């Protein structure tokens, strides 16, 4: 580019120089002709008849030369020739050239036509007026000389000017221009280089940002934001890949379905924040029990799914399940409460002929339910029995929905007696399900499902209504008035309409409120204590009695009792069971009794099966005892006949 620029500048400079010098030569010629032409015109005209040799001898040439020299002094004109219209050189400051023929020179021919023609040439040596000069730039111009009156061209002047100085100063400025351009371009280049480098960096940063965002989006698409585990998206693909890998390598894999027990209770009672915290801790502990190649998914709520690969033997999955269960043994603190995470795990293995991902998921799910039925913190492998149980559970749920409408629920009644008099002072209503095929189903087999499906609210309402009506009818029949206690589930307690349900039941049955007792559980108080107390106070305003069932099996401490408007405490059966052998249980039961009395709360012992237990509670000043020693739960008609008729019917 610089070379092109240099050539261009050179060309432009030459043109300019020639134009300038040409003008100056014209002016010079004009001044020559002004001072000389009148004198020399006749000679020039005459010279047209002379030959070259004759011309050289003419005295006018010497005269012309002397005048010319004078005119040329201090100018950079180095040679002047006068050519007559025939093309002969009639005068030259270089005398050797007088007589030479220029008639065919393009410059002469153009000047003869009235044009001024100039050109620049470099001469190694040149015969100037002052003698020989070397290495010069010479501008050579052919200039017509006219008759001042007729304007007719009478001769041609050939003027040579030495423009070397001008040329070198132009060259110098040209070099400076090129140098300046070079410097400018270098600066521009450096500037552009930094701009490009900066742009490169910006682009690289943007690319990194884009990639990070892409990864983040991909992560978010496939991961659960709460626990950081994989989400359900893409589960099928990953499971299928794991099955394929295991088939190829001849190894076994396992699918573990993990479900937290009683998570809903924590969520409902302690709030979603506590529920989230519990899920995070559980997920973290589960992840710690896995190898890097294993995958953990959170399916929804409290359900997790684990894919284990590369197992030497399928039973190895049991080690993982045990490790997970063990890892949950440390309680966590949620809103100031110590909570234990319990879970159930269902396991199935792969690859297994004809089993696709859907089947495996169903199997793991069904096994998990089997594990749940065994109690907390259990795991269960998928077996034929599991399959049958899973199918059974599904139809069970459908049947539970219809049971209320079909009138399949029934209340059984179990008496509570005064230890001193053995008189029935109260009765607990316990639900049973008269299944058309299975017969009488105990509550522990369907209450958890009722809670899970939300059916507990409508069934619970039916229980309160039925119990109130039943006991009122016994009152009306003249039996000695007794309380009836009804079990209230945590979900029912928190539903918000328990107070109106109870109020309606009392109104509909006409039972006096003081004859109704509601059995609550400790789990209802671990959440928002103020809400719980609020509901309890409203219930107390209705006039009903409140008790805490299974006391000692849950989370609450003895000291927390003072906050609740409670009338009775039912000591959990587990303490009663081992009373005779376990002195700690005895000491604990005594402590509970002493504490309850000091707070004005009556103590009821449940699960009393033998005389020693009865004696013990009698010695502890227990208000009421309940257990198989007196009666098992029986139907209303049996209760009326066996418990009420002979003893309590008033005359
Ligand atoms: P719970 O309220 O603690 O009821 C006492 C349970 O202990 C009853 O079992 C009763 O049959 C049993 N029991 C009483 N005395 C003895 C004894 O001396 N030995 C032994 N081994 N057991 C004894 P059931 O009827 O199977 O009820 C189990 C649980 O189901 C109840 O425990 C209660 O939590 C729940 N439940 C029952 N009916 C209802 C209901 O209508 N609504 C709600 N939400 N839960 C209910
Ligand atoms: Mg009870
Ligand atoms: Mg109980």
Image (spheres, rainbow, N blue to C red):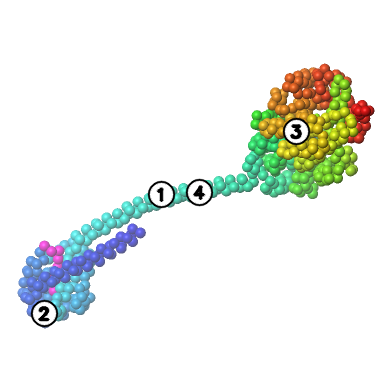
Residue identified by numbered label 4 = 206
Q: Is residue 172 above or below residue 586?
A: below
| N-term mark: 4 or 2 | 2
Mark 1 CB near ligand 1 (8 Å cut): no
Residue 247 in percent (x, y) is at: 74, 46
Quadrant that contains the C terminus = top right
- Mark-to-mark CA distance, 4 and 2: 84 Å
SS class, disc 3:
helix
Q: For this rendering, which residue is in front, 166 or 503?
A: 503
Disc 3 versus disc 4: nearer the observer = 3
- The residue lying furthest to the front in this view is 651
Tell me whether the residue at label 3 lies in contact with that at label 4, contact meaning CB atoms closer than 8 angstroms. no
> Which residues lie in the magenta part?
74-83
Tell me whether the residue at label 4 lies in contact with that at label 2, contact meaning CB atoms closer than 8 angstroms. no
Q: For this rendering, which residue is in front, 267 or 184?
A: 267
Q: Residue at 52% x, 47% y: name it.
A: 208
- The residue lying furthest to the top in this view is 619
Residue identified by numbered label 3 = 542
Q: Is residue 600 above or below residue 96?
A: above
- Mark-to-mark CA distance, 3 and 4: 69 Å
- Mark-to-mark CA distance, 3 and 2: 144 Å
Magenta run includes residue 82: yes
Mark 4 CB near ligand 1 (8 Å cut): no
| N-term mark: 3 or 2 | 2
Residue identified by numbered label 1 = 194
- Can residue 463 be seen? no
Circle 3 Cα neighbour tier, 10 Å, few/some/many (<14 / 14–19 / ≥20): some
Residue identified by numbered label 2 = 149
Q: Residue at 80% x, 18% y: name it.
A: 620
Residue 73 in percent (x, y) is at: 10, 64
| N-term mark: 4 or 1 | 1
């Amino acid at each position: 580019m610089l070379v092109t620029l240099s050539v261009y500048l050179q060309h432009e400079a030459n043109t300019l120089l020639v134009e300038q010098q040409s003008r100056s030569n014209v002016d010079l010629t004009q001044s020559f002709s002004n001072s000389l032409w009148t004198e020399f015109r006749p000679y020039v005209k005459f010279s047209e008849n002379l030959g070259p040799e004759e011309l050289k001898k003419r005295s006018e040439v010497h005269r012309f030369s002397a005048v010319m020299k004078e005119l040329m002094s201090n100018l950079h004109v180095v040679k002047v020739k006068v050519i007559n219209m025939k093309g002969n050189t009639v005068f030259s400051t270089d005398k050797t050239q007088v007589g030479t023929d220029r008639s065919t020179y393009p410059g002469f021919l153009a000047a003869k036509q009235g044009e001024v023609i100039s050109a620049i040439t470099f001469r190694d040596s040149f015969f100037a007026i002052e003698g020989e000069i070397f290495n010069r730039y010479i501008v050579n111009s052919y200039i017509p000389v006219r008759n001042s009156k007729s304007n007719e061209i009478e001769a041609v002047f050939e003027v040579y000017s030495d423009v070397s100085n001008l040329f070198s100063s132009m060259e110098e400025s040209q070099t400076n221009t090129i140098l300046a351009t070079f410097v400018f371009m270098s600066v521009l280049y450096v500037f552009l280089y930094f701009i490009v480098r900066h742009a490169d960096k910006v682009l690289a940063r943007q690319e990194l940002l884009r990639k990070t965002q892409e990864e983040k989006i991909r992560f978010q698409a496939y991961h659960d934001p709460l626990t950081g585990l994989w989400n359900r998206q893409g589960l099928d693909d990953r499971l299928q890949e794991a099955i394929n890998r295991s088939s190829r390598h001849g190894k076994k894999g396992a699918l573990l379905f993990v479900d937290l027990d009683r998570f809903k209770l924590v969520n409902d009672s302690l709030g979603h924040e506590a529920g989230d915290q519990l899920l995070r801790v559980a997920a973290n502990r589960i992840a710690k029990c896995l190898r890097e190649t294993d995958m953990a998914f959170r399916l929804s709520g409290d359900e997790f799914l684990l894919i284990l690969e590369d197992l030497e033997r399928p039973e190895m999955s049991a080690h993982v399940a045990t490790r997970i269960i063990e890892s949950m043994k440390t309680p966590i603190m949620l809103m100031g409460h110590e909570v234990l995470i319990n879970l159930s795990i269902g396991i199935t293995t792969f690859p297994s002929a004809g089993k696709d991902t859907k089947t495996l998921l169903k199997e793991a799910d069904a096994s998990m339910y089997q594990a749940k039925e065994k109690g907390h913190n259990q795991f269960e492998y998928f077996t034929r029995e599991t399959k049958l149980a899973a199918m059974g559970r599904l139809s069970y749920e459908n049947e539970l929905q219809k049971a209320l409408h079909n009138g399949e629920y029934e209340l059984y009644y179990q008496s509570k007696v005064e230890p001193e008099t053995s008189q029935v002072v109260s009765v607990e209503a316990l639900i049973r399900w008269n299944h058309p095929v299975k017969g009488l189903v105990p509550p522990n087999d369907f209450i958890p499902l009722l809670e899970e499906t939300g059916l507990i609210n409508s069934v619970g309402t039916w229980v309160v209504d039925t119990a109130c009506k039943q006991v009122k009818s016994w009152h009306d029949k003249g039996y000695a008035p007794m309380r009836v206690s009804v079990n209230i589930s945590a979900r029912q307690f928190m539903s918000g309409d328990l107070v109106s349900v109870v109020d309606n039941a009392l109104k509909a049955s006409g039972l006096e409120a003081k004859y109704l007792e509601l059995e609550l559980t400790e789990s209802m108080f671990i959440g928002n204590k103020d809400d719980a107390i609020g509901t309890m106070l409203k219930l107390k305003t209705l006039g009903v009695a409140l008790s805490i069932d299974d006391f000692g099996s849950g989370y609450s401490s003895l000291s927390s009792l003072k906050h609740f408007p409670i009338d009775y405490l039912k000591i959990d059966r587990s303490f009663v069971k081992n009373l005779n052998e376990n002195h700690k249980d005895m000491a604990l039961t005594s402590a509970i009794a002493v504490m309850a009395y000091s707070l004005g709360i009556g103590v009821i012992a449940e699960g009393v099966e033998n005389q020693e237990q009865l004696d013990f509670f009698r010695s502890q000043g227990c208000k009421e005892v309940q257990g198989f020693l007196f009666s098992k739960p029986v139907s209303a008609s049996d209760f009326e006949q066996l418990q009420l008729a002979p003893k309590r019917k008033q005359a």
